Amino acid sequence: MRLDPLNIVLRQNFKPIKTFYFISGNEKTFIENINTKIVEEVKKIGGFRVINIEAINDFVDELSMFEDKKIILIKNCKNINKESLDKVRDSGNMFIFSQENSQKIKGVKNIFLNDKDSYLIDCYELDKNSKIKVLNQFIKLYKVDIDKNLYWFLIEKLDNKYSFLENSLNQILGLDQKDINLFNIKKIIASDSSGKEKVFFSLYKKNNEITKVYREKILTNSDVNDFYYYCKSFCQLIIESNSEQDYIKKIPVYLFKEKSFLIDVYRQFDTRKRKMLLKLLSSTEKILRKERDVSIISGLRFFLNIKKITTF
C-alpha cells in the first residue's frame, strides 16, 4: 500500500499500524525526516526500542517474555523478497527500510506496494501543491497570521526540500507576530538557502576560520541538522562513486562553480579514508536518531572531523 509522506509529517490520520515501512525516493532529507517521524510516532505507543541493522537477513529474533518489542531500522533492501518478509512478519516488531531510488529496487518497491501489511512511502522534492498543504497546516497549527501577498511569496520561495522548508517555518515561528513581514521573511529564506551549504566549502581553511564561518551560518539546533544533511550528501557522493568520472557525473549541476573544489576533495580519499568517513557518518547518524536535535558545538566537531579525515 502506498502512503503520502505528507500524511506523516503533517500527522493527518497517520497511525503506525503496519509491520513494514519502505521509505524511498530521491530526496534524502525527506527520507531521513520520514524515518525519524515514524520512529517518534511508534515510540508514543510505548514498549518499543530501536535497533539498527544492515539488511533483513541480519535480524535475529531474541524476544523474551520481558523484553520490549523493537523498531528495526534497515539500511538497504538486500535479500528482500516475500519469503524474507513472511519469516519476520509475526515477530511483533516493526521494520523500517530506507533506501534511495535506483534500478535495483524497482522490484522490491512492488513487493511492499502489494503487501497489505506494508506502506511504501516515496519521498520527492515538494511541488507547489505540497508546499500549500504544509504551509496551511503550519498556519492552522500555530495560528500564525500571514497576509495574502506574503503567503504566495512563501509558496514560491520556500525550499522544495522538506527539511529546509521546515527549518524556514521554524524560524518564522520564532518571530513575534508583528515581525512576520516580507522584509524579515526574505532574510530567513535567503539565509536558509545559501548559508549552510557554503560552510562545507571552507573545508581547507584553518580551524579558526572554519569556526568563524560556521558560527555565522549555523545558529540553531535545526541549522545543525540541516548542515549535517548537506555534509552527508557530499560525503555519500565520495563513498558511493566507483571512479572519478562516476563522481563527476553525480555532482549536482547547480554546484558548477564548486566543481573543481569537490573533485579535489574526492581525490584525497582512498579506501581507508572512505571507511573512516562512513564510520563518522554512522556514529553521527546514531546521535541524530537518539537526540533529534544535536548541539551546535557537536555539529562543528563533526565537520572538523570530516576535515581531519580529508586532509591527514
Image (cartoon, helix red, strand yellow):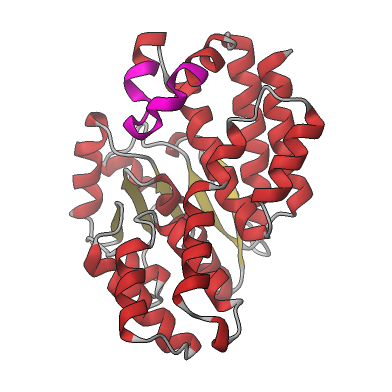
Give the answer, above or below, for where 264 lies relative to 90: above
Image coordinates for residue 257, horizontal then vertical, percent: 42, 26
Q: Can residue 223 be seen in this view?
A: yes
From the viewer's perspective, tell me whether residue 280 is left or right of residue 253. right
Between 234 and 156, the one nearer to me in the picture: 156
Image coordinates for residue 97, horizontal then vertical, percent: 41, 47
Residue lying at 36% horizontally and 37% vertically, measured from the top left: 77
From the viewer's perspective, tell me whether residue 154 is left or right of residue 43. left
Span of residues in magenta: 247-261
Q: Does the magenta stretch include residue 153?
A: no
Residue lying at 34% horizontally and 41% vertically, measured from the top left: 84
- Main SS of the magenta part reads helix
Question: Can you say which quadrant of the picture contains the C terminus?
Answer: top right
On the image, which quarter does residue 214 sit in?
top right
Q: Is residue 256 magenta?
A: yes
Between 178 and 239, the one nearer to me in the picture: 178
Question: Can you say which quadrant of the picture contains the N terminus?
Answer: bottom left
Image coordinates for residue 61, horizontal then vertical, percent: 54, 47
Q: Which residue lies furthest to the right in this view?
A: 208
